[in-house]
Image (tube, grey):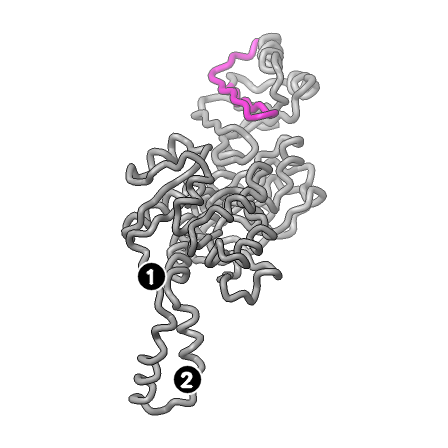
Amino acid sequence: MVKQILTFNQISSKGLDRFPRDTYEISKALASPDAIMLRSYKLQESEIAHSVLAIGRAGAGVNNIPVGACTTRGIPVFNSPGANANAVKELVATGLLLGSRGVIEGLGYVQTLTDISDHAELNRTLEAQKKQFKGSELTGKTLGVVGLGAIGSLVAEMALTMGMDVVGFDPALSVEAAWRLSSRVRKAEDLAALFAGSDYVSLHLPVLESTRGLVDEALLGSMRPGACLLNFARQEIIDEPSLLKALDEGSVRKYIADFPSPTLIGRDDVILMPHIGASTDEAEDNCAIMAADQLLDFLDNGNIRNSVNFPTLHLEREAGCRLSVTNQNVPKILGSVLAIFADENINVIDMLNKSRDEVAYNLIDIGTQPSSKALQQIRQLDGVINVRLIGDCAA
């Protein structure tokens, strides 16, 4: 049976080419797709057909997807963490340099000198005026990195190679991220200590209820005189009225971000970029490839990797049929499923069960295909969200 992938936005062909054309159809117009693949398109719950089994985001943020509604319906939402990390890291490096030197001001000044045609006069003018664009070097300065995931860890490593001292803070640091992190990155005791002790602070956090407006008046007011704040994560992390106050009072010398705001545009102490952190050919390719591979593995095998609302789960395929069961994270459901198999004398070859918050997800390899009656019994169990036969035995 051919599976259908509905796409929004322009997805890199290198990602779409991961789907075998003999078993997958890809289109921007499908009434009953098996999965959705998108980038920044603002997906509405009403646009998610009843047939949709999964959603893949070619990028890291998923605030454009109704994740809560997807969880309720048993739809895993995949993202592509780290696929655009190098692109963002390089733009952060650009931001650090723009924040430390009078590059933008100097470029603007040079463009005003179009009436000077004599080289000697131009050189004299530049020599006389260049002191107003003097900056400071990054070497020896302290960079505070808030969030040490795929991007933050690269930013920390990059800053170390530029001769900066680096202090980091991440209360949710994973073991995998910790292994990536250089031992030269000092750990801040808390956010307040990081902000107070840094010449530059770079934010690399997702938007969660716990991070929305996290950078507030208290943190901004504690920054060193002349400190610079960089935000290449999400606009909502910063409380904007507090930022404006900090800029007006001079507790923040310069704000550099990838998220323009009407109240910030036009300020001399703000550098705004048009949300181009991941806008490279390489990042778009990498994100699309990662999202496609994750959708493929889920649709063909039921495995889950890099889902923002489902547990990570990988089970090697065995002979026979595979069943996936998504249910509310409550006791006895898996036992009831196995009891139904026992009543039909169906042998379980292998299985794996994991949970995340209110959702539990099960992959069960069985020796023979269950009857329609057995599948219906499983679907009718209290707490079961959805049931799927995967592979050649799919009904």
Which picture quadrant has residue 98? bottom left
Mark 2 and mark 1: span between their CA atoms? Answer: 25 Å
Q: In the rendered image, which residue does mark 2 sit on?
A: 113
Q: What percent of the width, then of the height, locates residue 355?
A: 54, 23
* Mark 2 crowd level (few <14, some 14–19, many ≥20, 10 Å Cα): few
What segment carries the magenta color?
345-365
Q: Is 104 positioned to the left or the right of 239 in the image? A: left
Q: What percent of the width, then of the height, locates residue 5?
A: 58, 45
Mark drawn on residue 136: 1
Question: At label 1, which amino acid type do we have?
Answer: Ser
Mark 2 or 1 closer to N-term? 2
Task: Please tell me which residue is depicted at 48% across the width and 46% down the height of the picture.
Answer: 222
Q: Is 122 positioned to the left or the right of 146 in the image? A: left
Disc 2 is placed on an element classified as loop
Question: At label 2, which amino acid type do we have?
Answer: Leu
Was residue 295 drawn as part of the magenta stretch in this picture? Answer: no
Q: In which quarter of the image is the N terminus?
A: top right
Task: Please tell me which residue is depicted at 57% across the width and 33% down the height of the picture.
Answer: 309
